[in-house]
Amino acid sequence: MIGYVTGRSPLHRAHPYTTLALAGAVLLAAFAMTEPRTVWLLVLAAAALAAVGGVLRSSVRTALLLSLPIWALLFVLYALLGADPRVAFGPLSLSSPGIARALVLGGRVTAIVLSFLTALATTSPHRLVEAMTARGVPFGRTFLLASTLTILPRMRERAAQILEAQQCRGLRLGGSVLARLRALGPLALPLILGALAEVDEQVLALDVRGAAAGARRTAVDPPPDSQIQRALRWSLLLLVTAAYAWKFWSMRG
Amino acid sequence: MTPRVSLVGVTFTYPGADRAALAGVTLDIGAGEIVVVAGAAGAGASTLLLVATGLAPRLVGGTLAGQRAIGARRCGIVFARPWTQLTGLCSTVRDEVAFGPASYGLPRETVLAAAERAMQRLGIAHLAARDPAHLSGGELQRVVVASALALEPDLLALDDPAAELDPEAADALYAMLPQLGRAGTAILIATPDLGRATAVATRAVQLEQGRIVRDGSPAEVEA
């Protein structure tokens, strides 16, 4: 599941910038950490964030699904084909430094994907737009960002409608892989063409409603911010900066 | 009084098209006029709306020849399919309707008052807190019309506006138009639903292959 899920968790109620700052901090911190132990602590932190947002199960499941191909690739590249010394793992002989490297890289990917899935699931695009509008961000940028956040759920909804319509007209989805691939055509074509036609009309409708007026938009329903949340965001920035300073200091040492 | 829109010998061709969608159209629409544009599919009625509101060729592309003067301070347009006209960014009907006035940077209270007025006018004030994504087609179309009206346009173009409405809602939509006209809004309606449109229109034009072949009272054109 990728996209916003309604809820009343602390992350849902937080200012959108705070949720995004948390996800951004995980992203930056992941690259500052070089030890498997610290990277996996970060994965746990990302999981804790998902738990706070009430989206632990769905986010972990999707994160694992998305990370799995990367994990498989890392296993082959580093653990199987990595440098000596090697350790026996059942019938396999695995590279000891390769395993450590794969755990670091895989952990980074998992932490980043998990934290951003959590941010997506708990940040209402509408609240994000209002928060950005209140800060004077031009509409073009807010629209681009919010459209990116909402495109997957919208496409999924539309695909389900098209699928239903095509099934009513005799489309069969079962059978061999080839038959399933053939069924993709009647689904993908109306999905893409319909989306393009709708974008055309939406552009016209938004234009007459002043989207390109150039004035600073009024935030009608700006999400409340607080001193505590602002302090948290600054603290995250300081923590990430400290993590990088520590990393470079350790490398020099 | 300056017409809301004035077209003199206007010819418009879509990008890549070998035939003009509008050919030599001359039309003045004054304040308070309700003009219904009749014509078979492909006659150019929807194109006339895009040209009159200034959207073509500015956003649509293509070429425009002839003279066009848009006297309207603000134009509104409503298309047949309501779901394509939503911002996709608003979680309540109130915010969706308020989007237009908010775009012009008006004070928050003015924006909310304009949205409230438009919702009252369309009879959708009870939907204010609902998510637009969960409304029926008919309710959604009324939200779209309210969104256009929230900007208090001088020229309102309606492209088959009742296509998604049930008969009762369609009647209510058309019944509201004379009141808008009396307030000075010029209204241009392209629709195959001539029965309802001509009942409220003050004038009708008939298009055939992009040319105006009749321009007169609704009764004349309907005959």
Image (spheres, coloured by chain):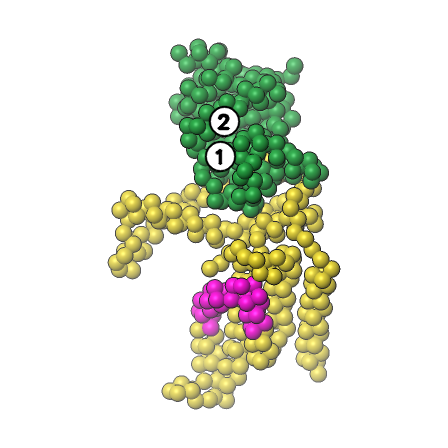
Chain colours: A yellow, B green
Q: Residue furthest front?
A: B126
Asked if the residue under mark 1 is in contact with the one under mark 2, i.e. CB atoms within 8 Å, the reply is yes
Residues packed near mark 2 inside 10 Å, few (<14), some (14 to 19) or many (20 plus): many
Rendered position, A243 above or below B187: below
Rendered position, A61 above or below B111: below
Quadrant for the C terminus of chain B, please.
top left
Identity of the residue drawn at 45% across and 37% down: B137
Residues packed near mark 1 inside 10 Å, few (<14), some (14 to 19) or many (20 plus): many
Prevalent SS, magenta region: helix
Residue topped by disc 1: B141
Identity of the residue drawn at 31% across and 52% down: A183
Chain on which label 2 sits? B
Residue A232 pos. (x, y %):
70, 64
Residue B3 pos. (x, y %):
61, 17
Q: Looking at the image, which is closer to me, A152 or A8? A: A8
Quadrant for the N terminus of chain B, please.
top right
Identity of the residue drawn at 47% across and 73% down: A71
Residues marked 2 and 1, same chain: yes
- In magenta, the rendered stretch is A43-71
Kindly identify which numbered label has been placed on residue B203: none
Q: Give amino acid for label 1.
A: Gln
Rendered position, A206 above or below B46: below
Kindly identify which numbered label has been placed on residue B173: 2
Chain on which label 1 sits? B
Q: Give amino acid for label 2.
A: Leu
Identity of the residue drawn at 53% across and 55% down: A6
